Amino acid sequence: MSKADRLREVMAAEGDAVSENTQGFNAGRYESVARLEDYEELKEDARSIKEDAIERLPELIDELRESVEANGGTLYVADDAEDANEYVRSVVDDRDAERVVKSKSMTSEEIDVNEALEGDGVDVVETDLGEWVLQVADEAPSHIVAPAIHKSREDIARLFNERFDPDEPLETAEELTAFAREHLGERIEDAEVGMTGANFVTADTGTMALVTSEGNARKSVAATDTQIAVAGVEKVIPSVEDLRPFVELIGRSGTGQDITSYISLLTPPVGTPTIDFDDDETPISEFDDDRDFHLVLIDNGRLAMREDEDLRETLYCIRCSACSNSCANFQQVGGHAFGGETYSGGIATGWETGIEGLDTAAEFNDLCTGCTRCVDACPVGIDIPWINTVVRDRINHGGEDGEFDFLVDGLTPDEETGSPSLQKRFFGNFETVAKAGSALAPVSNWLADASVSRAAMQRVLGIDARRDLPEFRRETLVDWFADRDVAVEEPRRRVVLYPDLYTNHVQVERGKAAVRVLEALGVDVVVPPAPSSGRAPLSQGMVSTARDHAERVSATLEPYVEAGRDVVVVEPSDHALFEREYERLLDEASFERLASNAYEVMEFVYGLLDNGAPADALAGGDGEEVAYHSHCQQRTLGLEPHTVAVLEELGYDVLTSDVECCGMAGSFGYKEEYYDVSVAVGDELREQFTDDAARNRTVVASGTSCLDQLDDLLERPTMHPIQLLAE
């Protein structure tokens, strides 16, 4: 089955349930964190604690061992999954246990401990409702926090009725949970060993923090006399006091709850008596409280990740799933497509690479489009897109030669020493494509759109024939500007307008509008020839090529900055590159010089108007109704309000999109394997802009990708907001 077919299958079977639930979690996160006055400070504290813990991990494990042993427990550090399972099996065997009851633990999923114990004839029962549903269905989790998120209530009712044949068919949520509570309660009472995970383990006291939505974890511990906790070594933090920011953030980030239903702080072995449920005569206080506790800390590749500069941040992850919930692509396909052997969502690339290897990560890595929404959502600020990009780069360099590599080896102008696929090299070298397209226009556009050409591009490059292609302009923005003779007397500001690839070669009118608007506001503008930003190769995981582009862009723009000019950028993804990713691609001084002097074009116009530039120099809206969609990276950089404020000041009636992503994401929406996902994401935007409130409005969008997607989805023209302002 092709990747496109597999994605369509998953979307058809699970997409509606995943979309409804993840979007609900994400909306809840926005509402919950808005009630926190110190949200950003808590995130900074949480990250600082994790950075420190991972830096000092070996010594913290030693301290934790002393604490656990002082409490009367045992700490075992397992090298890998096999080692961990052998230890768990030995504990269960020593107890002569026939049944193990488990609360939810992704780490136990990672090591396949259920299968190991079942091979010994042990009955293993998941007591988390979602995990138990999947155990009954013999399926893998599709979400880090809500493992059965892909199943509707109707799906679960059908499953239970078929499997258990109750006296009366189960239908409602209340009936399903009551049945599960009774069924699982009986099994917990009869179990000898309880197994849990641990969200955090404190080195100073050996205290485990369990953050759950059900009471099953406490029951599994209290009802059995032997507890085994399994956790990755990265779960260790220094002290109980360090738990505060995580307790505040984990529920809000994952499910939008101010606090989860149960936050259990256990310092095992717990001192409560072990109840004999068959003895209803003996007082509880007289039952034996002698308990056995084993903490199994698992390496399984983590300590190697700790030494890997690019994967290290993965270990800061607190498994909240905010990256999944905030991701437009995950919202459509869920973790059975956007995930590996165990972990799902954006952060899964780091986990699966470190634990399973590049081959596993390669299966889903390209579903991350680098939009950066997950970075803002992450409670510890992990740069998840960068991890995905670096892994993509490693996949490129570790892959085998493609079928058509002979066409490009030695001919492409990239810096790659490995062998990215031909598709990736095509999109990663789009600067060359754009230059050739403009030089040969309009013939190039006619040839590219011919049916034979489209069929060949779909077969060789994987460019979906259903997607409209960009039309290159013979006269580029740089050419047009060079032929002008316009001088601004006594300019209030001086800028260099960065001619990004699309503005220069395709969306030339928005570039012209930007020049005219800035000049109308008294700004002296220059538009020099400049290299592409590097966004195209970076999106393909071609890091060396992206770094080469970044260095050439910096060399081109730096003399203008030194001469006192601001850098104005029309394309939001390029502006975000200057503000964020260039920190990874340039030396510190070059990055800071460019980032501190770069502005998105509508942000710059807002600043001019706010500082006294005459608004009447621009085209007024006079009540014209517009529907505006901002680019993902405008939102993550907090720039969307500038555009809305400028349009409203000029008299436009603005309806802003509440859909977070258009789904196009640059080259992603052109690729045959992802076309249907792209359109499914964009369909929510189409619905909003064709409803009664928006259908007659002028559609404006800030990003190239957004404009491309909207042009395909809507039957009316679109434009960049700067074009509304130009006389």
Image (cartoon, rainbow, N blue to C red):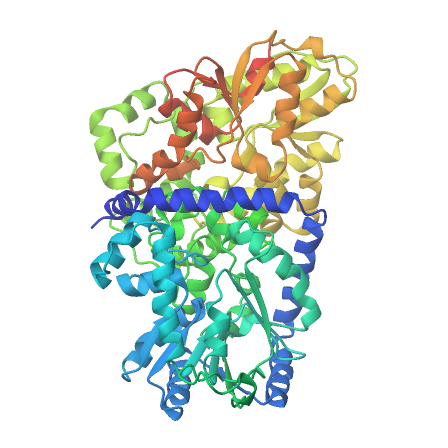
Q: Which sits in the foreground, 576 or 254?
A: 254
| Residue 171 horizontal/vertical position (percent) | 30, 50
104 with respect to 496 (left or right): left
Residue 112 seen by the camera: no
Looking at the picture, does residue 156 appear above or below residue 16? below
Residue drawn at x 35%, y 18% is 442
Looking at the picture, does residue 353 appear above or below residue 659? below
| Residue 607 horizontal/vertical position (percent) | 72, 25
154 with respect to 528 (left or right): left
Q: Which sits in the foreground, 364 or 166?
A: 166
Picture quarter containing residue 427? top left
Label tally: 0
Q: Which sits in the foreground, 711 or 656?
A: 656
Looking at the picture, does residue 714 appear above or below residue 213? above
| Residue 206 horizontal/vertical position (percent) | 62, 79
| Residue 453 horizontal/vertical position (percent) | 24, 29
Residue drawn at x 52%, y 71% is 198
Q: Which quadrant would the C terminus be assigned to in this image?
A: top right
Residue drawn at x 39%, y 83% is 278
Q: Which sits in the foreground, 668 or 648?
A: 648
Q: Residue furthest front?
A: 281
Residue 145 seen by the camera: yes
